Image (spheres, grey):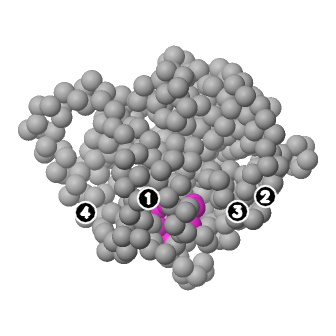
Amino acid sequence: MTQIASLELVQRTRVEQAIDRQHFGQFNKEILKAVTPSGRSLSIVRKLREDVPRRGGVLLVHGFAQNRYTWHLSTRSLVNFLADSGLDVYNLELTGHGRGREYGTAVARKFSDYVEDAASVIPAIADHAGLDRVFLMGHSLGGAVCYAAAPDVAERLAGVVTVAGLYRFGSNPAMRRLAEGLGALQRVAPLLGKAARIGTGVRTRAFGRLVANWWETADDLSAGFPLAGWVPGSTEPHIVQERVVRGFDWTGLNILLTMMRWAAEGNFDREDGHDYAEAFAALDVPLLVVAGDRDRLLPAEDARPAYDLSASTDKTWKVFSPVREEVHWGHLDIILGKDAPRFVWPYIQRWLLERCPEEH
């Protein structure tokens, strides 16, 4: 049985914030510290509205080397969009990310640290919100965390949503070559192997600042770069600049090497060989798998097996593309692009609300 994290209120305020551009809302905001059974402390930001009927709760999980700004920026916030509809939204920062470092938690030494800690938080936030079950939603590597944690807390889940979520990895040839190269380097470079064993952290913020400072060049290069994070022209410069400066974070070197191993070997497993993919496939919980048609970091071919192999009796596969949604979609812009509030957000919102219990 999964042990449950304890939640401590750090701060409670009432805020007026943007949902998208000039559309604002008023929200109750709580900053929570979650102390997990492992002894690690994580940060969670909760948003909700008291003046609308509450429909349900959702825990958001960011991706590789990111933090809470995956879901919330000063002028565009999926967190606020969901909270505005009556959802109780909890924005989790994974082990060693964001405010968690201020609480003394170092970067995770292995992917299973993320899974263990996230699984302990899910029942804690359900209890905190006064709900029997909550939704779990992840982006990119956060999707992998959701898939891996879900079987341990299935009885507290109302459903799982992944947006460009990792289940299989490496269909992009450039990513596979990078993975194979890092694997070979690890075998022949003693310093890299030692750094991985001691849990060395890697900071990505400098890269984020480089992208922000050279935005026009980066946007032009993204048209042909094989591992581009967004579709050129999909997102306003100030949005991407805020996202990459505030949202690029620390991570553990071992997390990167684990992802590269998955890509090189075609696996999605724990360090001891436990098959995360197989365990999730056997689970019968409502499932929404979302992908972008031009996502080069996590192509639709890598996301699709989570849907195909799932035993869920309520599962949905959705690829956003110009066929219905007018534009192409990449890895970051599927959440924060200028057209995401018009197409992606309402689609996810409807799926969640349709599976919420009666208003209470």
Q: Residues within 10 Å of mark 3 (few under 14, many from 20)?
A: many
> In the rendered structure, which amino acid carries the disc numbered 1?
Ala
Q: Which residue bears the numbered disc 2? A: 24
Q: In the rendered image, which quarter is residue 214 located in?
A: bottom left
Local secondary structure at mark 2? strand
- The reply to whether the C-beta atoms of the residues labelled 3 and 1 are less than 8 Å apart is no
Q: Is residue 230 left or right of residue 81?
A: left
The earlier-in-sequence mark between 4 and 1 is 4
Q: Residues within 10 Å of mark 1 (few under 14, many from 20)?
A: many
> In the rendered structure, which amino acid carries the disc numbered 4?
Ala
What residue appears at the point 27 percent right and 24 percent down from the top-left corner? 198
Which label sits in the foreground, 4 or 1? Answer: 1
Q: Quadrant of the N terminus?
A: top right
Taking 185 as reference, is 4 above or below it? above
Local secondary structure at mark 4? helix
| Mark linked to residue 174 | 4
Q: Position of residue 188 (x, y in %)?
A: 8, 38
> In the rendered structure, which amino acid carries the disc numbered 2?
Phe
> In the rendered structure, which amino acid carries the disc numbered 3?
Asp
- Judge whether residue 330 is colored magenta: yes
Q: Quadrant of the C terminus?
A: top right
Q: Which residue bears the numbered disc 1? A: 212
The earlier-in-sequence mark between 3 and 1 is 3
The earlier-in-sequence mark between 1 and 2 is 2
Local secondary structure at mark 3? strand
Q: Which residue bears the numbered disc 3? A: 20
- Judge whether residue 159 is colored magenta: no
